[in-house]
Image: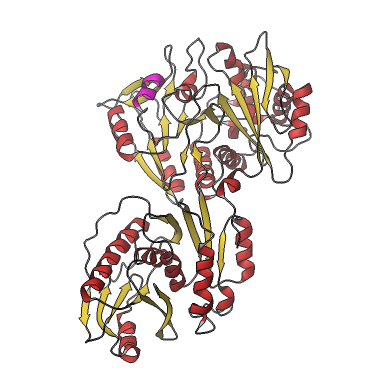
């Protein structure tokens, strides 16, 4: 077993290279290295071209929103040539020397922080260039999709974003206005795309407003849903002297709202940390002295908002947005990568879809101040529980999750080809299995978010869950395949329970025995097998029997998901504790057929239920396994 903090996992090998670009004078900028592995330095940069100079190149590369390639003058520019020109302009002389000394080694990642003061109108010429396309001569991958680099645009501000603990689930509110007097946004296609790519991702909760998208409706839902991510797909621009987002009025026509007014309206949504703008030219900076330059800059620079903004600097196609969102959120939530690394993964997904285009440069990440973090590292540890697989499999998992606490019980059970539910030796539970689980538990730190996954029998899951009580002392989540859909979900105990009106399907008085039998059938009927065990082996020990079968419809045995399962767990555990107290039962005999995560959380909530004898079904009958609470 080994334990490494998740802070170390997420930030291990991540080095900052902070470059402050001063406003240009006669096309030349002073460049300051504020932070790097090789120290500080300074230099000068002459802008190699303007965005206007690149329009023929962007048209030729079939960038959405730039018209037909045939309408543009011919250009000799290639993505490599543009990338080389940007790189050579920024990294000159001493700045290049510091870069070469800081070049990532091994598994390191170099985070390029491009710091700009957008309050200067002269910075537009700098900020609108596609810096993500930078390519070091002799290298293959542009920095914006390189494995060894990430690029973030930092806007100078005195107040950095205040990170919050990484939420579970990560709540996304998608807002898709389509005013009747504006151009079509392909709203229905965007909605279908978001549902397709986001709903299957474990650890995400998605809500969508795509009809009657008035400001009042959006702000009411922001207050009630408390999302962490606001995903805006629609129209934006600068029809006058300020940037606006277009919502709908009561009649469905356009209702513009300035970026400043929008910022003021959402400043009390303290859960919000990321705004994703999929709008026409949504990250382009406006001319003039207004410090809120462009929609993205206006939102990021507002000191009353603790948000980063992920903006599409050019028009984005639906399939590209779909590829980006899927890769971005999987990277952020499932793989626990940093925000900027997740953006890189999203860009790479667009590139892999259309490698001959430069459409992947469209997503641009803006943050405020020195820090890139909007979420503090998850502060979690992984627990890998194994009874079925070989040690080689567990070692591979451990390399993938270097901070994991590994509970490998595979050597105590039959070989990999035989998925036996009983250990090789009858006394293994008390002699080997329970001590290993308890020893592993000492490596976990309170308070912690514990993520559990693995391949194990129900008794092992319940035994592990039993260690974590009482509820709410820990934040627990378990990777669980939904029985109904087959999708892997993250069942989390975070959130308020929903009361469940449930009582035992049957209560049997078996005689004078002092013990209480409890059978819970989620995935398959087990009452006949349990009765056979009681009749043949339990003798007079069991006096009462509670039977739970929450799904009375025989064609629908599966649970809808983790929230329903956890509500059932809480309700059943409460009844079991109540009946144990009423009957003054000496021991509970527990028989369960259901999902692994259900067994885990049942163990959590029955910690205060006294002695519990667990059973596994093997070879046509039930056999005692772990004794908990003794």
Spot occupied by residue 312 in the image (x, y as percentages of width and height): 51, 30
In the foreground, 469 or 159: 469
Q: Quick check: 66 above or below 627?
A: above
Left/right of residue 186 with respect to residue 389 in the rendered view:
left
Spot occupied by residue 381 in the image (x, y as percentages of width and height): 52, 54
Our reading of the magenta stretch's main secondary structure is helix
Spot occupied by residue 352 in the image (x, y as percentages of width and height): 62, 43
Which stretch appears magenta?
Answer: 258-265
**Residue at 63% over, 45% down:** 12
**Residue at 25% over, 67% down:** 575
Q: Quick check: 490 above or below 171?
A: below
Left/right of residue 88 with respect to residue 180 in the rendered view:
right
Q: Quick check: 190 above or below 298?
A: below
- Give residue 207's quadrant in the image: top left
In the foreground, 161 or 234: 161
In which quadrant of the rendered image does the N terminus lie? bottom right
């Amino acid at each position: 077993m080994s334990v490494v903090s998740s802070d170390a996992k997420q930030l291990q090998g991540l080095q900052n290279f902070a470059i402050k670009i001063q406003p240009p004078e006669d096309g030349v900028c002073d460049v300051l290295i504020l932070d790097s592995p090789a120290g500080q330095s300074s230099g000068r940069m002459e802008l190699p071209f303007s965005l206007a100079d690149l329009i023929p190149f962007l048209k030729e590369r079939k960038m959405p929103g730039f018209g037909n390639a045939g309408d543009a003058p011919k250009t000799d520019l290639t993505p490599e040539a543009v990338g080389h020109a940007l790189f050579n302009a920024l990294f000159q002389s001493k700045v290049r020397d510091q870069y070469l000394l800081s070049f990532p080694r091994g598994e390191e990642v170099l985070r390029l922080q491009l710091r700009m003061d957008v309050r200067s109108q002269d910075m537009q010429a700098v900020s609108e260039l596609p810096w993500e396309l930078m390519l070091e001569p002799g290298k293959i991958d542009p920095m914006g999709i390189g494995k060894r680099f990430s690029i973030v645009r930092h806007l100078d501000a005195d107040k950095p974003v205040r990170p919050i603990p990484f939420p579970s689930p990560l709540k996304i509110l998608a807002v898709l206005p389509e005013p009747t007097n504006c151009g079509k946004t392909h709203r229905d296609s965007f909605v279908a795309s978001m549902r397709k790519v986001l709903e299957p991702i474990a650890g995400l909760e998605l809500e969508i407003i795509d009809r009657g998208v008035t400001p009042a409706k959006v702000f009411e839902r922001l207050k009630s849903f408390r999302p962490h991510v606001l995903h805006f797909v629609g129209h934006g621009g600068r029809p006058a002297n300020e940037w606006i987002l277009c919502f709908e009025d009561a009649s469905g026509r356009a209702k513009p709202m300035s970026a400043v007014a929008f910022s003021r309206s959402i400043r009390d949504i303290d859960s919000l940390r990321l705004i994703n703008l999929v709008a026409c030219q949504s990250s382009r900076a406006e001319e003039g002295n207004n410090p809120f330059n462009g929609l993205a800059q206006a939102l990021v620079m507002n000191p009353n908002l603790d948000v980063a903004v992920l903006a599409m600097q050019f028009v984005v196609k639906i399939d590209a947005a779909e590829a980006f969102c899927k890769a971005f959120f999987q990277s952020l939530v499932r793989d626990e990568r940093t925000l900027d690394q997740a953006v890189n993964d999203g860009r790479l997904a667009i590139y892999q879809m259309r490698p001959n285009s430069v459409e992947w440069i469209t997503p641009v990440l803006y943050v405020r101040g020195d820090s890139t973090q909007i979420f503090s590292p998850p502060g979690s540890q992984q627990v890998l529980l194994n009874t079925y697989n070989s040690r080689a499999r567990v070692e591979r998992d451990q390399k993938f999750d270097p901070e994991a606490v590994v509970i490998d019980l595979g050597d105590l059970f039959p070989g990999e080809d035989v998925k036996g539910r009983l250990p090789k030796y009858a006394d293994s539970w008390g002699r080997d299995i329970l001590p290993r689980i308890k020893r592993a538990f000492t490596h976990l730190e309170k308070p912690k978010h514990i993520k559990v996954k693995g391949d194990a029998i129900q008794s092992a899951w319940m035994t592990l869950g039993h260690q974590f009580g009482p509820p709410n002392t820990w934040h627990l989540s378990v990777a669980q395949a939904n029985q109904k859909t087959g999708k892997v979900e993250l069942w989390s105990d975070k959130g308020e329970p929903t009361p469940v009106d449930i009582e035992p399907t049957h209560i049997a008085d078996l005689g004078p025995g002092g013990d209480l039998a409890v059978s819970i059938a989620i995935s398959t009927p087990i009452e006949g097998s349990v009765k056979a065990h009681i009749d043949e082996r339990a003798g007079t020990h069991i006096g009462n029997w509670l039977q739970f079968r929450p799904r009375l419809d025989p064609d629908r045995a599966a649970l809808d998901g983790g929230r329903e399962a956890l509500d059932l767990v809480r309700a059943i555990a409460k009844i079991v504790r109540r009946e144990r107290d009423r009957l003054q039962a000496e021991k509970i005999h527990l028989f369960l057929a259901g999902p692994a995560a259900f067994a885990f959380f049942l163990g959590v909530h029955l910690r205060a239920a006294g002695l519990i004898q667990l059973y596994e079904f093997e070879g046509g009958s039930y056999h005692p396994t772990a004794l908990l609470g003794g």
